[in-house]
Amino acid sequence: MSPPEEISDEEAMAAVDEVIALKPISTVLIVIAMQTEALPLVNKFQLEEDTDACLFPQKVPWVRYHGTYKDLHIDLVWPGKDPVLGVDNVGTISASLVTYASIQAFKPDLVINAGTAGGFKAKGACVGDVYVASDVAFHDRRIPIPVFDIYGIGARRTCPTPNLLKELNLKVGKLSTGDSLDMSLQDETSILANDATIKDMEGAAVAYVAELLSVPAIFIKAMTDIVDGEKPTAEEFLENLVMVTAALDQAVTQVIDFITGKCLSSL
Ligand code: FMC
């Protein structure tokens, strides 16, 4: 009898990836930053708020909604509100923590980070547009030491979804993430270097955690404000938040409908 053929670790990993890519997606984790963005989706998918105290550490403000929609199990998580200030826990830190804890607890096949964002009109973005991010990177992690500089930017390609993009009428652009709603001159330089069309406060952080835990992730971002426009960002953001959330809600529903019954390799 001939000895079994040796395969390298890389070949074994590729074989595992192929099996995963061909497995139908059954569990999706939706990561959202703000309550205003989360609630329409909770209603649309008829999700229930979780009361199981053991899933997240005690006393954290994170909120999980869950349910089954067209055979797909959906967990939707939102990092809740600051217990003292009462505002949404936006930004990279809360997004990373809740993504990490949720992937560990719910073992999703796919992560969807959905939210509002700013867009650049110089790249063709308009208020109300919904984008799928092709790439993500950070714009406020400047480490001017060789190689650390590249680490700081943290550029990543997102999970490719050519069929989803063909089928749904969504725009595609690069996403740049930082922990500020406004934009300093240094941030602007980095955003230009990242070739970004979209600017948010969570995407690249969610991408980092998803990659760390080997879960594919996609990013759906609806434009509340035009970063290179005339209006002050905070004012424009607040003015459009509710209206743009409806566009986000519609796009996420289309994406979930598209995903249902498919495997990763056919997205
Ligand atoms: N810059 C950065 N973030 C945002 C933005 C902009 N012009 N418009 N909307 C956002 C998103 C962020 O990701 C936060 O979750 C929230 O809206 C603003 O605090």
Image: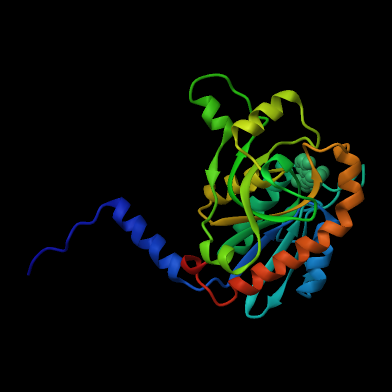
In-front residue for pair 91/55: 91
- Please indicate whether residue 16 sits to the left or right of residue 170 in the image: left
View quadrant of ligand 1: top right
Where in the figure is residue 192, as x and y percent of width and height? 64, 32
The correct choice, above or below, for 174 with respect to 6 in the image is above
Q: Residue at 77% of width from left, 65% of height from top? A: 249
Residue 90 visible in the shown view: no
The correct choice, above or below, for 29 with respect to 186 in the image is below
The correct choice, above or below, for 258 with respect to 155 in the image is below
Where in the figure is residue 166, as x and y percent of width and height? 56, 65
In-front residue for pair 41/106: 41
In-front residue for pair 137/164: 164
Where in the figure is residue 146, as x and y percent of width and height? 49, 21
- Please indicate whether residue 86 sits to the left or right of residue 40 in the image: right
- Please indicate whether residue 18 sits to the left or right of residue 262 in the image: left
Residue 76 visible in the shown view: yes
Quadrant of the image occupied by residue 201: top right
Give the position of the N terminus as an image quadrant. Answer: bottom left
Quadrant of the image occupied by residue 216: bottom right
Q: Residue at 39% of width from left, 64% of height from top? A: 18
Where in the figure is residue 256, as x and y percent of width and height? 65, 70
Q: Residue at 45% of width from left, 65% of height from top? A: 21
